[in-house]
Amino acid sequence: MMYWLKRTLSKNSRNPTTSTQSNSTQPQQQHEQEQEQHGITEELINHVKSFTIHTFKNFPLQDEDESNYSEEVESTSTRVRKDLSQWQERHAVLILSRVKEISQLRYVLCPRHLKENQFWKIYFTLARSHLAAYELRAIQQEKLKQMAMEEDKSSDNHPYEIEMSEAKHVNFIEPLPPS
């Protein structure tokens, strides 16, 4: 996870089309739309800026079993993972690039005081009230996409496949013996 995050941040810093200082307005609008989809609002930014080193150091963490966290992820994500969901990973990249304070906190805290996954677990717990609706919407949209893809696959059947499947379901009635 940490390697992926560093690699993604590195790519984003080298790729001028993903920066917020792009010359064309379309990439800028897409970037702003992506930030909105991932819950990066001024309200969240102000909330995140209030975090301190002590906020993270003094946060009560469970032991490494992370049992409650995995249950929470199960109820709010299509995938049960102990680390970050795909939506959370993208949110983390966006928030680190947008809010220098959280980036600096992460730099100071990881790995000297906290493991990377602990840092993000605390972050998402602290930001839950601001992010829950956005993450839920993303999960719902992903499920709708999956359902649409499954529907498309079923409608792509060839006529002979449909005919064969219908033939399997036809009940043959045995003739009654003559009376």
Image (spheres, rainbow, N blue to C red):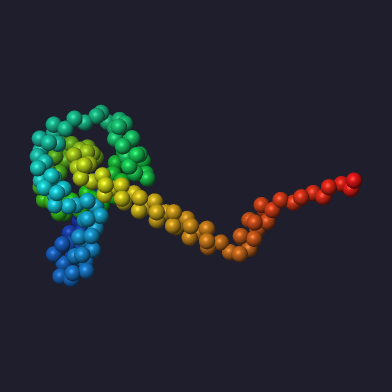
Q: Can residue 1 be seen in this view?
A: no
**Residue at horizontal 11 percent and vertical 47 percent from the top:** 46
Q: Residue furthest right?
A: 179
Residue 37 visible = yes
Q: In which quarter of the image is the N terminus?
A: top left
* Place of residue 111 in the rendered image (x, y in percent of width and height, measured from the top left): 17, 39
Residue 53 falls left or right of residue 76: left
Total numbered labels placed on residues in the image: 0
Where in the figure is residue 11, as x and y percent of width and height? 22, 58
Residue drawn at the location 33% of the way across and 35% of the way down: 71
Q: Residue at x 32, y 42 (%)?
A: 76
Q: Among all residues in the image, which is located at the extreme bottom?
A: 24
The image quadrant of residue 109 is top left
Percent x, y of residue 104: 11, 46
Residue sitting nearer the eye, 66 or 129:
129
Q: Position of residue 27 (x, y in %)?
A: 21, 66
Nearest the viewer among 38 and 170 is 170
Q: Nearer the viewer, residue 144 or 66?
A: 144
